[in-house]
Amino acid sequence: MKIKKRLFGVLSNGQKVSLFTVSSRTMSFSVTNYGCIITSIMVPGKDGSMEDVALGYSTLDGYVHNPVFFGCIVGRYANRIAGASFTLDGKIHRLTANDGPNCLHSGRPGYHKMVWEATPFCKSSEAGVVFTRISPAGEQGFPGNCDLKVSYSLTADDNIVIKYLARTDEACPVNLTNHTYFNLSGAGSGTILDHSVQLFADHYLPVDAQAIPTGDLAPVEGTPFDFRTPKAIRRDIEAVTGGYDHNWCVNRDDSSCAPVAGVYEPLSGRALTVYSTQPGVQLYTGNFLNGEKGKNGDVYGKHAGFCLETQHYPDSPNRPAFPDTVILPGERYNHETIWHFDYN
């Protein structure tokens, strides 16, 4: 296992930003302390050729721009909160309305636009970086000071492991995720419509015209949302208005790190299995990508990448029937996601 650090760029305020590249004998990934953003994931295919399977930019300036959340950490509450507000203990907390009247990925200032403290580590079987910061009370409109720790590591058996830890000194909803866009053929190689996806979920959350959950947990059986057995994304996507951008309710009996999704790209032979402790996973099929200029001169059009955002359900702070996301003083938000890569 190896880890290298280099200067990635300098922000307009003079703050230096680092890039860390973590490598095993078979694959590698790079991550910056600006927004805890994964900038690349190099994975071999069945013919041994290495490709970068993560969409993104070549320079720090691209990520300062980054309107589509390539590769970054999102929080304090990932996904959407209806009406850009929620009520907790009788008090209304108002957030940024940055998705119509709603709040998406906690509005401004986004965690993906902040420089985090970074501590690299390297062991014989695992290497990575631990990122930390304190989100002060009132930031983004959320109550309480939130002590955050996010670690990214690569193991010798081709797992990228993401661990999220948070503590607050006031009751507050917390929901962190990573927003990497994948294309297992290689970033910039075309659409992901022929990727085969399996989701280990019998139910999903229907949404309204603003992509806010209606509150129902609907069976996937007999709908375009049925990914219980693997199928190509393109098969039913035209039957879903706007494309897939929905939360699936993961089948689970406990809080262990269990498989939530599997993806296979037949031409390259690359496969990704996602494990998580979270109750939900959002499949997003890059519906709003529209010619974003990425790394190596690539242009990312519609469906150029997919996201699998492990998370609690969207709008949970306004939905008492959904799994609770409120962390109390003395409690810990503690979740883990694993991306396992195969190539045969």
Image (cartoon, grey):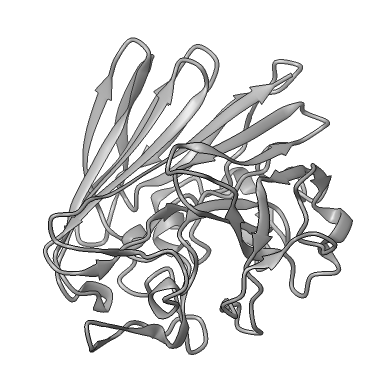
Q: Which is more toward the observer, 148 or 66?
A: 148
Front-most of residues 338 and 221: 221
Q: Which quadrant of the structure image shows residue 329?
A: bottom left
Q: Is residue 154 above or below residue 272?
A: above
Q: Residue at x 24, y 69 (%)?
A: 172
In the visual, does 44 lie left or right of 220?
left
Counting the numbered discs, the total is 0
- Up the image or down, 215 lies above or below 123; here it is below
| Residue, far right | 235
Residue 98, image x, y percentages? 45, 81
- x and y percentages locating residue 231 in the rendered image: 83, 46
Q: Residue at x 82, y 62 (%)?
A: 224
Q: What residue is shown at x 56% (from left), y 77% (from top)?
A: 215
- For the N terminus, give its image quadrant: top left
Q: Is residue 290 visible?
A: no
> With 132 as the anchor, is 268 left or right in this view?
right
Q: Nearer the viewer, residue 197 or 59?
A: 197
Residue at figure coordinates x 70%, y 39% from the top left: 263
Residue 63 visible = yes
